[in-house]
Image (spheres, grey):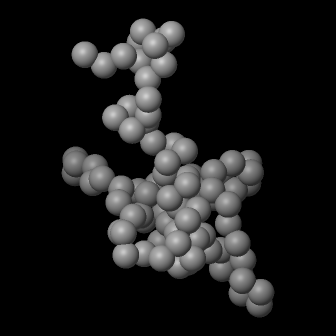
Amino acid sequence: MQPVRPIHVPEEWHDRDLLTFEQFCDLVQIPVRTVRDWRRRRIGPRWTRLEGTGRLYITVTEVRRFLRATTNDHRQIPTDPSHPEDKTS
């Protein structure tokens, strides 16, 4: 079993750059089938289709938004004192 590599969106990627559906799946290490299911159920990131093409694209801005919304990194999220289970020792 290979260790999971961290998900990292390179700083030099411009927010308006586009990734293909497959590039997104590879970046976030999620099977294409899972992301297709998300689309079918209308959950997950927002996609766009360029006129005249059948391909789905996602902006780098949307990738970053999606990762922020789904990351459980407690170092970046302020803890709520009313929830003791959120406190770190």
Residue at 48% across, 76% down:
14
Query: Is 12 drawn above or below residue 87 in the view shown?
Result: below
Query: Is 56 drawn above or below residue 28 in the view shown?
Result: below
Observer able to see residue 5: yes
Nearest the eye: 57 or 31:
57
Q: Is residue 58 left or right of residue 39?
A: left
Nearest the eye: 88 or 81:
81
Residue at 53% across, 79% down:
17
In the rendered image, residue 3, in percent from the top left (x then y), is placed at 22, 48
In the rendered image, residue 68, in percent from the top left (x then y), is placed at 49, 48
In the rendered image, residue 64, in percent from the top left (x then y), is placed at 50, 58
Q: In this view, does 49 lie to the left or right of 1?
A: right
Q: Is residue 26 left or right of residue 22?
A: left
Observer able to see residue 33: no
Of all residues, the one furthest to the bottom in this rendering is 52
Which picture quadrant has residue 58? bottom right
Residue at 41% across, 18% down:
86
> Quadrant location of the C terminus?
top left
Which picture quadrant has residue 20? bottom right
In the rendered image, residue 73, in percent from the top left (x then y), is placed at 38, 37
